[in-house]
Image (cartoon, rainbow, N blue to C red):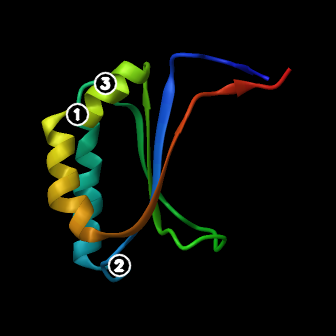
């Protein structure tokens, strides 16, 4: 196996909120999360809903960055930091974060 594209990075996070499913608070959180797309460097942004029963997570966020430096800039961006402090930490019950680069199977 080899890296298909050694620069592009896909950042994903799967999570469960503290809010009741279908609540206004849940919708408000997801709308706020969707605003992260405005941070420079974010590409291919998606808010995802879990439909399977193989884990306890309800939602996911997925976004792509041109390279690790673009992701680092996003991670340090004041809007991202504010979202983490003001929304993520108080409202997310459980999460897993994974960063990927594509592999090509020869």
Nearest the viewer among 38 and 54 is 54
Q: Marks 2/1: CA distance?
A: 31 Å
The kind of secondary structure element at disc 1 is helix
The N terminus lies in quadrant: top right
Q: Which residue is mark 2?
A: 22
* Mark whose residue sits in front, 3 or 1: 1
Q: Quadrant of residue 77?
A: top left
Q: Marks 3/1: CA distance?
A: 12 Å
Q: Which residue is mark 3?
A: 41
Nearest the viewer among 46 and 73 is 73
Q: Quadrant of residue 68?
A: top left
Q: Which residue is mark 1?
A: 76
x and y, in percent, of residue 32 in the image: 21, 55
The reply to whether residue 15 is visible in this rendering is no
The reply to whether residue 75 is visible in this rendering is yes
Q: Marks 2/3: CA distance?
A: 31 Å
């Amino acid at each position: 196996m080899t890296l298909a594209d050694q620069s592009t990075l896909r950042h994903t996070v799967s999570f469960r909120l503290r809010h009741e499913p279908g609540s206004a608070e849940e919708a408000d959180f997801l709308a706020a999360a969707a605003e992260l797309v405005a941070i420079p460097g974010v590409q291919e942004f998606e808010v995802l809903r879990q439909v399977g029963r193989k884990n306890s997570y309800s939602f996911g966020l997925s976004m792509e960055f041109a390279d690790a430096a673009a992701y680092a800039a996003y991670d340090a961006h004041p809007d991202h930091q504010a979202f983490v402090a003001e929304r993520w930490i108080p409202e997310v019950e459980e999460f897993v974060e994974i960063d990927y680069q594509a592999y090509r199977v020869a």
